[in-house]
Amino acid sequence: MRTSMTGLAIVFTILLGLLGPAQGFPDNTAPHNGITDGFKEALRHDARIDAHGITVSTMKGIVTLSGNVMNLAAKRYAGPEAKKINGGLGVINTIAVMPNFRRDKDIKNDAGAALDRDVVGVGWVTNNLSVHTGRRNDWAIREDVEVSIATDIILDGSDIGVKVKDGVVTLYGVTHTMNEKSHAEDLAARVRGVIKIVNTINVDQRLRYSDVVLARLIRSALKWNWSTYRVHDKIHVMVQNGVARLTGAVDKWSERREAGEIASNTEGIKTVDNRLTVHDDDER
């Protein structure tokens, strides 16, 4: 009897393997719905992304993003958000960048219909509105990108140029690190009207210890040092051929000594000429 029961169990197990999962209950339906819903929820809470134009679908753990967004930065932010969802195996980002994803003709028609419908006493409307393209001028895009790069503290001292053709931004020049190259691209992506970025910036590690960069490193260290942050804006830093010169006036001798040590400990500095004066001579 025991042998017969064992044989039946083996046969039943083999049949289950041949038949596969029961029909109507696919293994991955619930997880896929969970991934899609989870990502939609993440999009709704991300202030950087307008999720109204984005469509999300999931198949075998792969999240596909489609639809339209207003700028390139939103498209780039959407991809990493999908990767944060548990269960997702990968992301296919086919989102299109369209600064105006409503047709100009539709906007014009809706404006005329709204006037016709909402103003009391209007019998009809003669619509002489002209239609202007939603694409920004290349010169306006270039100016915004240039200002963003020129005023960014991370890129201070970098030599970056900008060209724009039909909304496509080309970045060229030289930075000191790969992080600065990527950061310049991120800044350009946030500018309205940019649809694509071609980043041809070269990274030259030899420029890491240029006088301009060394001065910037010393100023940054003075700003974030506990002993000198109160007076960092009173200290003038100049570097020439690796020699740092500190000028200006501080409140205490301890601040003067610390500023000299900060400059001396900066990698790439050969020597320090500390010409800082002190207001409080009694502390000495």
Image (spheres, rainbow, N blue to C red):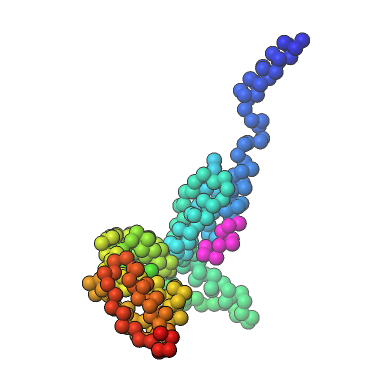
Would residue 2 be found to the left or right of residue 242 on screen? right
Q: Nearer the viewer, residue 259 or 213?
A: 259
The quarter of the picture where the C terminus appears is bottom left
- In the picture as drawn, the residue positioned furthest to the right comes out as 1
Would residue 241 be found to the left or right of residue 36 on screen? left
- Quarter location, residue 46: bottom right
- In the picture as drawn, the residue positioned furthest to the left comes out as 241
Whether residue 44 appears in magenta in the rendering, the answer is: yes
Whether residue 192 appears in magenta in the rendering, the answer is: no
In the image, residue 281 lies at what x, y percent?
A: 40, 89
The residue under the point 34% across, 83% down is: 276
In the image, residue 251 lies at what x, y percent?
A: 42, 86
In the image, residue 52 lies at what x, y percent?
A: 55, 61
The residue under the point 39% across, 63% down is: 183
The residue under the point 52% across, 62% down is: 49
Q: Nearer the viewer, residue 246 or 111?
A: 246
Q: Nearer the viewer, residue 250 or 170?
A: 250
Answer above or below: position of 261 versus 60.
Answer: below
Q: Nearer the viewer, residue 227 or 160?
A: 227
The magenta segment: 41-49
Answer above or below: position of 61 versus 17.
Answer: below
The quarter of the picture where the N terminus appears is top right
In the image, residue 217 lies at what x, y percent?
A: 35, 70
Residue 161 in view in this figure: no
Residue 212 in view in this figure: yes
Number of numbered tags placed on the structure image? 0
The residue under the point 57% across, 53% down is: 39
- Quarter location, residue 87: top right
